Amino acid sequence: MISASIYFDRRRANKNGTYPLRLNISKNGGRACMVLGINLLLDQWKDDQVVNHDNARVLNIAIRDKLTQVDKYLLEKEATGHFANKTAKEVLLEVRAHIDPDFAEKLAVEEKQKLKEANSFPRFFQTFIATKQNAGTRKLYQDTYNKLELYCEAKAIDFQCLTFDDITKPFILSFEQFCLTTQKQNTASRHLRDIRAVINAAIDERKTTNYPFRKLPIKHEESRDKSYTADDLRKLFAHDCYPGREQEAVDMFKLMFCLRGINCGDLANLMHSNVRGDRIEYVRQKSHKAYSVKIEPEALEIIEKYKGQTHLLNILERTPNYKTYFNWLAKTLRKVGLVRVSGKTSTGKAILPDACTGSARTSWSTIAQEDLDISRDTIAAALGHHTVDVTSTYLRTDWKKKVDMANRKVLDWVLYNKK
């Protein structure tokens, strides 16, 4: 049962010695009050009405009308069960909004802001990024977030006010076209996949039901072949490099190849403690899986040449950011084979004109399969992609031994032209 009454609050006087008149809402033992904007002296309220006041008649009429309005509203709402699960405080807020248009407008604005914040796409995106443990993954998602911010700025859209409902199919397609003005299709598609992942997470957490990717395929272009043939690599490794760091670029690329296409970050961060006997044991940054590579003599020779004090190699001791180092390495590799005329001018053709650090990995796997007929399962195991299927559970395959043998075959073929 809900009831409304007028309450003269004598607990604390205002600065002018008056006391406030309040509207009191009671429900199931709970109470909530609001001021009515009427302040009286102690002798001006008696038997639930205003007395000894110049405007007593007007004030009493106003109070009765207000109470009648509230009682009528409560009866109507109670009849529908509207207040069944609400507290006295929640009932009072609705009553106040009913009798005070200005408060109702203010409440509507606040509710709209709360809803917008709860449905904020940028805010949830940042929360989603923070859940990713891998720094590289966080950076990729942050890149997409930044790209969305640039898109909204270009389209005069208030990015921070974006809600999940604003992420529509036309919005996605327009954003993709914006990305394509400066990026390739696969990069733009990665941004779309990132947005899709964020929205899927929001749906899982019941933040939204909006899913703009329905019947919206994300395009994919085949990446260029980053692999090189055994002949290409033989030419590179046998090339008489210019004095200076060109030889270092070739050496490091050769080391990556000898270590079955080891990832740049993994290679740069290897410590001396990762070497156990004739093997390098480490956990891959990308997959967080344990990895083991046998150190063949060719790899050991290069490791000794560029040995670091704390790390296995001195890469980070010379270049704190390994990405800067490997960007230089890739650019230098693409120049090997050119004939230098004068200064920065060169002629001729590079041995690996489109080389990148990933070429060591793709070349190793391609040569293993195409030239030496090494099985895909062995190659997968060598690259850390091997998964256990039903058949594998019945086998006792020594993958480490198989992978070591495969790597030795690849190195013998490429370095010594011997199968």
Image (cartoon, helix red, strand yellow):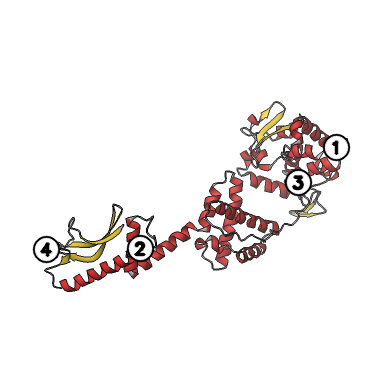
For numbered disc 1, what is the local secondary structure? Answer: helix
| 48 lies left or right of 157 | left
The residue type indicated by label 3 comes to: Ser
Q: Nearer the viewer, mark 2 or mark 3?
A: 2
Instruction: Give the numbered dot on residue 413.
Output: 1
Residue depicted at x 85% and y 37% = 413
Check disc 3 and report the residue beneath it.
359
- According to the picture, the residue beneath numbered tag 2 turns out to be 94
Q: Secondary structure at mark 3?
A: helix
Q: First in sequence, mark 2 or 3: give its number.
A: 2
Q: CA–CA distance between discs 1 and 4?
A: 108 Å
- Kind of residue sitting beneath label 2: Glu
**Residue 304 on image: x %, y %:** 71, 32
Q: Residue 122 appears at what percent x and percent y? A: 52, 57
First reached walking from the N terminus: tag 1 or tag 3: 3
The quadrant of the picture occupied by the N terminus is bottom left
Residue located 61% across and 46% down the image: 136
Q: Is residue 79 left or right of residue 205?
A: left
Q: CA distance from mark 2 to mark 4?
A: 32 Å
Q: Quadrant of the C terminus?
A: top right
Residue 296 image-quadrant placement: top right
* CA distance for labels 2 and 1: 82 Å
In-front residue for pair 132/268: 132
Residue that badge 4 annotates: 43
Q: Gap between marks 1 and 3, in whole Å?
A: 17 Å
Alpha carbon distance from label 4 to label 3: 93 Å
| Circles 2 and 4 in contact, beta carbons < 8 Å | no
Q: Kindly identify the amino acid type of the residue bearing the numbered disc 1.
A: Trp
Front in this rendered view, residue 345 or 73: 73
The reply to whether callout 2 and callout 1 are in contact (CB within 8 Å) is no
Residue 339, x across and y down, in percent = 81, 51
